[in-house]
Every structure is written in structure tokens, then in C-alpha cells.
């Protein structure tokens, strides 16, 4: 292991994965350091689960290399997996086992020594709030508790790399909050990757975000970086009374400097909505109002709006490129 | 080794947790009991009046051979139904529930997983065998004379045959996500092996010889008549480990068409 990079716990080097002819991941490279909680953000089918399965050693990539704490998982799977905790997307556990029985089983498989086993399992159960349900059958637990059991099994043997695939999907708001708190506490000295298709989750939980779609990383940055990008972008929304003015208006706006991502959506009752992005330095609204009035366009509403993470994400999904934002 | 035992123990107790475990134990006891009683009664009937059955001199019949030899042949049919049900869940269920996926992320070798599963099922099978030893006690109690060699060899043969079949069943289970398909597949495979044994009777020459060599029942029969042949031991050992190896390969191919 290279000492100067010893705090890099996960490293993807040009990783691609094909299912048959289908490219699920294309040339993905990134690093995750200790203490980071990285969020994989992307719609269903983006390739998040595929990337996580590759990290967890479930299957190898078609090409490229994955290093866990500097250990190539393809060459030394046994050694690399010792540092790993994985919570799968569908937490599938043995329904006819008791919680404590199951966790002891996992601890043994992960190589927790016999004399530490009882204390170790107890510690994880207490951390995940499972002490009260130790002797219940897993199949009889609520979804929220099953998720905690899933988290507890991932934490067995204290892995330094945690992979959590959609840890909060399907939980109610209280449970989501609890799981988030647990994950936050875990992120202190580990490398955590979690995937989600819920945007707010990323901003509340993650120190860094990777936006993924169609097997590629579209954008990557800390939440702070993303926020600063957001600050210098804003959107302007226009409403036209008469949709026959639409083409004319689009032409005028298209010729205007500083207008980006021009969009047009038809609305009910013949009204048209137009929106575009611009920088907040220069307020284009007076200019547009004046121009449209001169040209006789039936402008009835003009509105300015800060771009949210969601807007950026949707924009990225649409044109699939980063633009100059990142 | 500790990990293999952990998996084996889990597999073993999951056999017990299910209603299947209880049903199987009852079934094995019931069926073997019926076979045993019928054989003993038959023997008693013949020994009362050997001439009626075309036997001039009854002392020519070996008591142990008559009862236990036939007993072991008969209960081997039971394996045809028992093995598919014991093995159907082993891998199929874990593949369906995606619990196997999680197991692959633990620091375990594929061999440890396969060996653990196989061992757990073998343990459960051995527990089912225990009551069969009771028939020796009953036999002695009703005044039978025992020839220990053939009886013990019979048990050994049954154990070997059972293990071989179980390995085949676990392999079939590793091919599918559905326990039902696994059970049907295993049953069909065992049926094919069973049919091997008939070929010997209806054909002759090289083919008869080949099928006899391949037939598990032909090798098993030697044990039931009190013959211990190294060839038979090697055969069952090879059978068992070959299917274990196939299971291992089938688990490894999760890497799919990458
Ligand atoms: N085993 C598989 N065989 C074939 N295609 C698959 C397989 N697993 C996933 N895919 C495809 O790969 C793409 C990425 O899937 P996945 O990684 O599960 O996405 P996500 O987790 O982001 O929703 C999807 O289009 C999915 O249909
Ligand atoms: Mg997924």
C-alpha cells in the first residue's frame, strides 16, 4: 500500500461492467477517503447497485480495477472483503432465524474471534437499537427493524468501508430519520458510500455527491461545492397568454446573451410556460418585459427562482453533460 | 473450518425449523418401520412352513440376509423422495431470497460456503438415520440372530448412497432459484440413476457392464449382501466429490457473461 494514499479506502479505476451487450457502467473512476460519506445519486437503472456490487466483490468488473484499502479485490478477495460491510438494496435475511442467532452467525462468518463474539454482537445490537428484539424471528420484524438488522450485519467485524444500497427506501419518516442518524454516526472514521434517488437525503447526509446516470458519473463534488454552484445559477420562468406567440418569444430569448437551457412546456387553456437558466449577476427581467411589450407578445407573468439541486440534476439527466458548472 | 461449521450449523437447524424436518423424520420412521415389519413377518411365515415355498431345507436361508439385506434395498427407494426434499432449499432458497448475495460479500471462499451447506445437510441426514439403528435392537429383542458384518456394512452403504445423492441434490439446487424446480430436477436425476440399474437386466455385453459400473444401486447392493469392495468405496467417494465440485463451479459462475 502506498503510504501517501493510505487514507483512500475505495478506489475505482476505469471500471466498466457489461451485462451481455448492455453497458451498465462505463469507465467509472473515483476515490473515497476515510471520514467521507459519499452519496450515489441517480434514477432507477442508473447503475448504482451494479457499482456497489462490484465494490462488495459480488461480481468482478468487465474491465478496470477496484481497490479496497489498496487491495485489489479481484486478486485478494478474501483480504479485501475483511474491510467491507454491505447492506443490499433488498435487505434479504433469513426469516426463520432469530435476530441474535443471525447476527452471531454473521459475526462468525466475518471472522470475529470466539471469545469476543458475544460482546461484539451485543455492541452492534445496542448501536442499532436491536437489544429489545434479539429473540424475535427476523421474518416477524417490521421493515424498519429488518433494515436495522441489515445495518447490524454490515457493521459486524467493524469494517472500514461501508456500502449501503438505498438504506432508507421503503421506510416511514421516523425510521428514515433514525437510519440517517445511525449512518451519520458511522461516517466519522470510515468510508461510507450510500446510494439514493432522493435528493434531500444527499444534502443532509453526504459530504460528497456523485450524480450517476446510464453508467456514468455526470458530476461529482462536495455538497458545499454544489451549493456554491447553485448560488450563481438561477432560473427565470415566463408565462404567455397566447400560445401563438411562443415561437416568436423563443426566437427572441434564444438570441439574448446569458440565456441557457431554454425550455418550453405547453400548459392548459392555451397558455405557454417558458423557462431558462441564467446567472444572477444581471437581472434580465426588465429587458425581457420591455422587449416583449414592444413586440406585442402576451407576457402575463415573469418570475425569478434560485436553482435547486433538483434542477441541476434534472438538467444533467436531460443533456447528460456537465456544462461548466462543475 | 470454523466458518464451514457455522454455515453447516445454520443449514442443519434450518432443516429442523421447517415443518419439512418433522415431516421427514416421521416419514422415514414410518416407511422403514413398515418395511421392517413386513420383512420380519414374511420371514416368520416362511420359516414356519418352508416346504410350501419350495424350500426343502430352511437352514439354507440366512436370517440376517433375508431381513436386513432386503430391508436396505427397500429403504434405498425412500432416498428417491427424501433427498430432493432435503436438498431443494439449500441453494435455491438462498438465491431466491438473495441471501446468497450477502454471503458473497463476506470474507468467505466459495468452497467454505459449499462445504458448509453440504455438511449441514449431511448432519441432518445422519440424524434421520439414527432411528434406523433401533431396528437392530428390536430385532435382537424379538429373538433374531445377528450377523454383524452385513448389517453394519448395510448401514455404511446406505450412508454412502445417501451422501452421494445429497451431493447431487445440492448441485441441482445450486442451478435454480426455485426449490420446487430443484426438487423435481433432483428426483428426475435420481430416477435416471435408478434406471441405470435396470439396463443391466435388459441388455448385455459392454453396455450392461458400463451401466452397472455407473449405477449407484449396483455398488450399493454389494454392501447389503455383506461385501466390502474398495471399488465401491472409491465409486461413492468420487460420486460425492464430483458433485461437490460441480456445485462449486455452479456457484462460481455467478460472474455471469461479464
Ligand atoms: N443481472 C443483470 N442482468 C442484466 N441487466 C442488469 C442486471 N442487473 C442490472 N441490470 C441492468 O443494469 C442497469 C443498472 O442497474 P442497477 O445497477 O441495478 O441500477 P440502480 O441500482 O441505479 O437502479 C439497469 O438498466 C438494469 O436493468
Ligand atoms: Mg439499485
Image (cartoon, coloured by chain):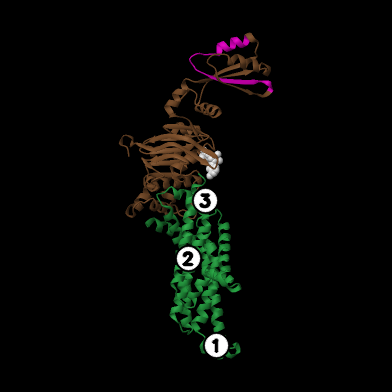
Chain colours: A brown, B green
Residue that lies at the very extreme toward the left in this rendered image:
A3
Label 3: chain?
B
A321 or A198, which lies in front?
Answer: A321
Lower sequence index among marks 2 and 1 = 1
Which residue appears at 46% of the width and 84% of the height? B145
* Circle 1 crowding by C-alpha within 10 Å: few under 14, some 14–19, many from 20: some
Give the spatial CA distance, label 2 vs label 1. 36 Å
- Mark 3 packing: few (<14 Cα in 10 Å), some, or many (20+)? some
> What residue appears at the point 48 percent right and 84 percent down from the top-left corner?
B144
Which of disc 2 and disc 3 is earlier in sequence? 3
Q: Which residue is mark 2?
A: B163
**Which residue corresponds to mark 3?**
B97
Quarter-of-image position of residue B201:
bottom right
Residue lying at 60% horizontally and 20% vertically, measured from the top left: A274
Residue numbers of the magenta segment = A269-293
Was residue B72 drawn as part of the magenta stretch in this picture? no
* Number of the label disc, if any, that sits on residue A132: none
The residue lying furthest to the top in this view is: A294
- Label 1: which residue? B47
Dot 2: element: helix
Q: Secondary structure at mark 1?
A: helix
- Between B255 and A102, the residue placed more toward the observer is B255
Q: Characterize the local packing of mark 2: few (<14), some (14-19) or many (20 or more) Cα atoms within 10 angstroms.
A: many
Mark 1 vs ligand 1: CB below 8 Å: no
Using residue A245 as the reference point, say whether residue A220 is left or right of it: left
Q: Is residue B216 above or below residue A208?
A: below
C-alpha separation, residue under disc 3 versus residue under disc 2 = 26 Å
Specify the farthest residue to the front: B206
Residue B98 position in % (x across, y down): 50, 49
Amino acid at each position: 500500500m502506498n503510504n501517501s494514499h493510505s487514507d483512500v479506502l475505495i478506489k475505482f479505476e476505469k471500471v466498466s461492467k457489461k451485462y451481455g451487450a448492455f453497458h451498465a457502467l462505463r469507465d467509472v473512476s473515483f476515490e473515497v477517503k476515510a471520514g467521507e460519506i459519499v452519496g450515489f445519486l441517480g434514477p432507477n437503472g442508473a447503475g448504482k447497485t451494479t457499482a456497489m456490487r462490484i465494490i462488495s466483490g459480488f461480481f468482478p468488473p468487465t474491465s478496470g480495477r477496484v481497490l479496497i484499502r489498496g487491495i485489489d479485490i479481484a486478486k485478494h478477495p478474501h483480504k479485501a472483503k475483511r474491510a467491507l460491510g454491505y447492506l443490499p438494496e433488498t435487505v434479504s435475511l433469513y426469516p426463520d432465524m432469530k435476530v441474535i442467532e443471525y447476527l452471531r452467525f454473521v459475526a462468525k462468518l466475518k471472522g470475529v474471534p470466539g471469545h469476543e463474539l458475544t460482546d461484539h454482537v451485543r455492541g452492534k445490537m445496542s448501536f442499532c437499537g436491536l437489544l429489545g428484539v434479539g429473540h424475535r424471528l427476523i421474518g416477524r420484524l417490521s421493515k424498519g427493524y429488518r433494515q436495522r438488522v441489515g445495518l447490524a450485519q454490515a457493521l459486524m467485524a467493524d469494517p472500514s468501508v461501508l456500502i449501503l444500497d438505498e438504506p432508507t427506501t421503503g421506510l416511514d419518516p421516523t425510521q428514515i430519520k433514525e437510519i440517517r442518524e445511525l449512518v451519520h454516526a458511522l461516517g466519522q472514521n470510515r468510508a461510507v458510500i450510500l446510494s439514493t434517488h432522493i435528493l434531500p437525503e444527499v444534502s443532509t447526509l453526504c459530504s460528497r455527491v456523485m450524480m450517476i446516470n446510464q453508467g456514468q458519473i455526470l458530476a461529482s463534488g462536495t455538497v458545499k461545492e454544489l451549493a456554491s454552484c447553485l448560488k450563481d445559477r438561477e432560473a427565470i420562468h415566463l408565462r404567455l397568454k397566447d400560445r401563438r406567440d411562443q415561437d416568436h418569444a423563443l426566437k427572441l430569448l434564444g438570441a439574448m446573451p446569458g440565456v441557457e437551457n431554454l425550455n418550453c412546456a405547453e400548459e392548459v387553456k392555451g397558455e405557454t410556460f417558458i423557462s431558462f437558466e441564467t446567472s444572477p449577476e444581471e437581472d434580465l427581467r426588465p429587458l425581457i418585459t420591455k422587449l416583449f411589450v414592444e413586440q406585442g407578445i402576451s407576457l402575463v407573468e415573469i418570475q425569478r427562482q434560485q436553482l435547486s439541486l433538483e434542477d441541476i440534476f434534472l438538467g444533467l439527466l436531460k443533456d447528460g453533460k456537465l456544462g461548466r458548472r462543475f | 473450518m470454523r466458518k464451514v461449521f457455522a454455515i453447516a450449523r445454520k443449514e442443519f437447524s434450518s432443516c429442523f425449523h421447517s415443518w419439512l424436518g418433522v415431516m421427514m423424520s416421521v416419514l422415514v420412521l414410518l416407511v422403514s418401520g413398515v418395511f421392517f415389519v413386513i420383512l420380519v413377518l414374511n420371514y416368520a411365515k416362511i420359516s414356519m412352513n418352508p416346504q410350501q415355498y419350495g424350500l426343502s431345507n430352511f437352514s439354507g436361508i440366512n436370517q440376517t440376509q433375508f431381513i436386513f439385506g432386503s430391508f436396505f434395498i427397500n429403504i434405498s427407494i425412500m432416498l428417491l423422495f427424501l433427498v430432493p426434499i432435503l436438498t431443494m432449499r439449500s441453494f435455491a432458497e438462498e438465491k431466491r431470497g438473495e441471501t446468497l448475495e450477502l454471503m458473497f460479500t463476506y470474507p468467505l471462499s466459495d468452497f467454505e460456503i459449499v462445504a458448509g451447506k453440504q455438511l449441514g445437510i449431511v448432519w441432518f441426514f445422519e440424524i434421520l438415520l439414527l432411528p434406523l439403528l433401533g431396528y437392530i435392537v428390536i430385532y435382537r429383542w424379538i429373538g433374531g440372530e445377528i450377523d454383524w458384518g452385513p448389517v453394519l456394512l448395510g448401514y455404511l452403504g446406505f450412508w454412502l448412497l445417501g451422501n452421494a445423492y445429497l451431493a447431487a441434490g445440492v448441485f441441482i439446487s445450486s442451478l435454480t432459484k426455485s426449490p420446487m424446480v430443484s426438487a423435481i430436477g433432483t428426483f428426475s436425476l435420481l430416477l435416471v440413476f435408478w434406471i441405470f440399474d435396470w439396463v443391466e437386466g435388459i441388455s448385455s455385453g459392454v453396455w450392461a457392464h458400463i451401466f452397472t459400473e455407473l449405477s449407484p444401486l449396483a455398488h450399493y447392493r454389494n454392501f447389503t449382501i455383506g461385501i466390502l469392495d474398495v471399488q465401491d468405496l472409491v465409486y461413492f467417494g468420487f460420486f460425492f466429490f464430483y458433485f461437490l465440485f460441480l456445485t462449486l463451479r455452479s456457484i462460481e459462475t455467478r460472474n455471469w457473461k461479464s
